[in-house]
Image (cartoon, grey):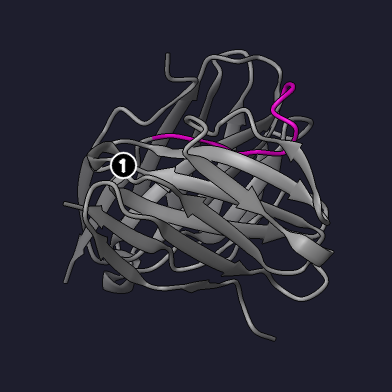
Amino acid sequence: EAGVTQFPSHSVIEKGQTVTLRCDPISGHDNLYWYRRVMGKEIKFLLHFVKESKQDESGMPNNRFLAERTGGTYSTLKVQPAELEDSGVYFCASSLTGNIQYFGAGTRLSVL
Amino acid sequence: DQQVKQNSPSLSVQEGRISILNCDYTNSMFDYFLWYKKYPAEGPTFLISISSIKDKNEDGRFTVFLNKSAKHLSLHIVPSQPGDSAVYFCAATGGGSQGNLIFGKGTKLSVKP
């Protein structure tokens, strides 16, 4: 069974550009989460989808971040326009029941 | 304000000995706790978990202990192996977090041969 897949693994962009991260959860997992780890800090929650609906987006830093999960399958996280402080590793996780979450390898975003 | 704290950024242990990783939390409403292991350039991998109605959970070489009155949990690895060298994250959920995990900053474990 395939795990959580994230693409790209690494993205380098300039300040002001747009970047879109993609996450494919484990098949059958209705719950999909986005997290971010900024250098030296803890992994922090961004938002939670149940199927295609946003269950909780309290962790989204500002309106430059837009997450979608059309059809309740894969999800995208768009940052537009990117700022220097957006640099970090973005993790996606999925779960069946909500307690145990399975993580992807992450996308390392570098904003120059 | 950090709700989950791992006060030791690193720990070094000899192969074959016990590794004890500690985690403290402040929110008494947390009802489920997890440990994840992370290798460089990989995502966190689920290791073991415990519900707040229990005080111990064991899975092979890994045991998690929960002391609710002290708001403290620990992960014991016995015996430690060089392949256990990784960053270990403590995480908690419940208490209105709606399923999202609250993580500590992690403890880097080095197991020396």
Taking the spot 64% from the left edge, 20% from the top edge, the residue there is: B68
Asked if residue B22 can be seen in this view, the reply is yes
Q: Position of residue A3 (x, y in %)?
A: 61, 77
Q: Is residue B100 magenta?
A: yes
**Mark 1, residues whose alpha carbon is within 10 Å: few (<14), some, or many (≥20)?**
some
Asked if residue B18 can be seen in this view, the reply is no
Taking the spot 36% from the left edge, 31% from the top edge, the residue there is: B6
Q: Position of residue B5 (x, y in %)?
A: 40, 26
Q: Position of residue A9 (x, y in %)?
A: 37, 72
Q: Amino acid at mark 1?
A: Val
**Relative height, residue A29 to residue A97 (above, below):** below
Of residues B28 and B67, the one nearer the viewer is B28
Q: Position of residue B103 (x, y in %)?
A: 48, 37
SS at circle 1 = loop
Left or right: B112 as drawn, with respect to B30? left
Magenta stretch? B95-104
The chain letter under disc 1 is A
Q: Quadrant of residue B101?
A: top right
Q: Quadrant of residue A39?
A: top left
Of residues B106 and A66, the one nearer the viewer is A66
**Relative height, residue B31 to residue B112 (above, below):** above
**Residue corresponding to mark 1:** A38
Taking the spot 30% from the left edge, 66% from the top edge, the residue there is: A11
Q: Is residue A79 magenta?
A: no
Taking the spot 43% from the left edge, 45% from the top edge, the residue there is: A36
Q: Quadrant of the N terminus of chain A?
A: bottom right
